[in-house]
Structures are given as structure tokens and as C-alpha cells.
Image (cartoon, rainbow, N blue to C red):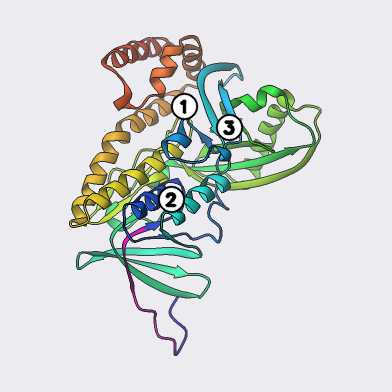
Amino acid sequence: MPPAPGRTPPAMESVDFVVVGCGPAGATAAREAAAAGLETLVLEKDAVVGAKRVCAAGLRPGFCETFDLPRSLVHCDTPRLALFDDAGREHEVPFGPGHTTTREELDGTMGALARRAGAGIRTHALFRSVESAGGRAIVEYADTTAGVRRRVAARNVLLASGATAVAPPALQYARWTEGLMTTLQVRVYLAQAAAEIAYRTLELHYYRTAAGRQIVGWMFPKRDHLAVGLGVLGKMPGAELRAELTAFERRVRSRLYPSVEITSVKEEGHLLYGGWPRPALAHENVMIGGTAAGLVDATNGEGIFEAAMSGRIAAACVAEGRLDPVRAAARYARLLSARFTRRLSHRVKLMRFLERVPARYGVLFEQLASTPRFADVLQKEDWQRTMGDRVYLYGQALRFAARAFGW
């Protein structure tokens, strides 16, 4: 997008920290970096922060407290996690209370807090490239309102623009496309409330299509609607995906709102990620975080917590390493990998093991439902587990393997 004839290209700006994307990773990084005194600029491609995010938007217990967010953005507190296996059997697993919200509210709130902390948020800013030169990272982006390309230099850059992020060559991952998921979701608005249990439950469904494609479906309650959606690894033709979602929504309706009038339905579709974490998380003074780093739990699609935490780690490393941006980025990569890569890689392995023989979902869900401590330990991060937890988890894993290999 070259400048119009006769127009002088704008001078290059200079800031301490550039963040690409204003989702949970980018907004947290911007808020905490600005609060630490760094001149921070966020580049967001959309006109409104959070307006185009397609996500069930479930938050793990304590999320608002961990990231100092107002509880007012929470729609429903959900003490039940209901897992449905390939045969359609429901297994209730102790959990929570978890929380639900919408990405408009979550991202919008987090972006507003980043702006309040002093970060600049520039919308209509479409990231194009980044390169290191003279000890600085040079970001080029398209100002889609003015119709020109602009450049900004920074000590450090965090790329946090989700599953469709454009990674520079040094951070690209050959297997990235293997983990991309095609998703479709409807927001179902009802004339009267659904069954009471719907507003206390996060539902996750694991089943195969008639053609043998593995589906993960969900029903998450919100303040004024129910979010019902599904995802499948790889591409699926639009008509086929809509047919699958229609059939799934009918199954949900038959249990939770069989005789309630549906006043409106809003359809949303997008690419999400459910594969291996990206092996390279930083190069020179450029970092990558959130879903763009592959920080998503492949078993359930959760990635909001990991995204926000990656933003926190990025802000801390950049603030502490102002005099050596390359070292700051390398430290970020080490800390982030140590915290999340092992656990999330194990979740990918587990998901692929279950997918090969769908009956194994029922074996695992039955064990989780009947053994509360197993569910509790499994939900912890590695650093939260005691030695006793690790021994217990190993024993439960052996028990599951012994039963699962029987299928």
C-alpha cells in the first residue's frame, strides 16, 4: 500500500514496546508494561477491541482476581463441568466455580484498563512485518483508515494476534497449520430462560461426525444468551460445518430449552488453534505470545489464562531488561516455555490418543467424575503440584492407560 502520489511517507515513530493485538495477551502486556513506565503502543487491526473474537469465553476460577479485573464482566458462575463422551453420556466433573463472559466485554475491559494505565491503543492498524535493525525492532503496519503504511521502532515487540498471526521467518512453525481448527458458533437468544442447570454448567462434547471427523462441541451460558458451537481440526466445507452445528444445537436444545421460543440467533465463525505449542517463542527482540504462541489446551480449547499470563511475563521481562532487549526476549521465552510448554504438549498427546479410539473419552471422563482428586490435580499447573500430587497423578495415569488400551 504505497503512499498516494505526492504524499510524503510519515516519519517513523519510536516507543519502548509495541504490542500487536489487543486480546488477553496483548492487553495484559500493554497494561502492565505501561504501569511499569514503558512507553507502550498496541496495534489492533479491528475497529473495536474484541468485536470480532469468536470464543466460548470461559474463564478459569480466580481469573478476575489474578489479573485484577472487575467481577462485573462475569456473566455466570459455573460450578459444574459436564463432559459428554462419544456415546452421548454425561459425566459431571468437579470444577470451579468457573466463569463465563464474552470476548467483547473481556477484551474491551482489558483494553480500557491498558489505556488507563497509559498504553496507546491504535485501532484499524493491520500488522504487516517486523525486522530487527540497529538494536531496535521495526514494525510496519497498514493504517487502514488513512490508507497508508506506517513504521514504528521499539526496543521490544510482542506478537499476540491469535491463531491467524503473521509470524516472522525466525518464529514460523512448519506444523502450525496442523493445529488450526475451523469453528462455528451461534449465540442463541431465548424468550424465556433455559433450564436452570444450563446457567450453572460448562458443557464440552466430544464425538465424531458420520464421516469420522472428530468434533469438540460446547455450550456455555451467558447473561442474555447461550453460546453453542463446535470446532474441528483442519478445514471443513461451510455447508457441512453448518449442518453439523445445526444438528448439535438441536441436541442441546432438546435437553435445555425444548419448548422455549428462540428470538434470534447470531452466527460467528473463525479459526482457532488446538495443536502443539510453537517451539520458538522469541527471536532477537521480538516475542510471540498467547494463541499465536500455541498456548492453548488441546483437550478443551482453553487459552485465555495462558494468553494473559504470557502478556504478564512479557511485560515483566521487557521492564526488567530495558538495557538489553534481546536478553529480555530470551528470558521471556525461557520463562514461558518452562511454565506452559510441557503441560500443553502433554494435552496434545492425550487428545490425539483419545481421538484414535473415541470410546476412550468415556473411560477418562468416568475416571475424572468418580475421582475428584484426579480432576483437581489434573487442572493444576505443573508448578502448583506437590510431590504427592505428582505421584498420585502418575498412578491415575497408569490406571487410565490400563483401561484405555483395552479398547
> In what element is the residue under mark 1?
helix
Horizontal side, residue 241 vs residue 277: left or right: right
- Sequence-first disc among 2 and 1: 2
Tell me the distance, in whole angstroms, between the alpha carbons under discs 2 and 1: 34 Å
In this view, the residue in front, 267 or 315, is 315
Amino acid type, residue under disc 1 in the picture: Glu
Residue 372 % position (x, y)? 46, 12
Q: Is residue 13 magenta?
A: yes
Quadrant housing the N terminus: bottom left
Residue 123 % position (x, y)? 50, 63
Residue 39: assigned label: none
Q: What segment carries the magenta color?
A: 7-18
Horizontal side, residue 240 vs residue 117: left or right: right
Tell me the distance, in whole angstroms, between the alpha carbons under discs 3 and 1: 14 Å
Q: Which residue is mark 2?
A: 27
Name the residue located 32 percent from the left edge and 49 percent from the top edge.
Answer: 315
Relative to 365, residue 115 above or below: below
Amino acid type, residue under disc 3 in the picture: Gly
Tell me the distance, in whole angstroms, between the alpha carbons under discs 3 and 2: 28 Å
- Sequence-first disc among 3 and 1: 3
Relative to 383, residue 18 above or below: below
Q: Is residue 195 magenta?
A: no
State which quadrant residue 188 falls in.
top right
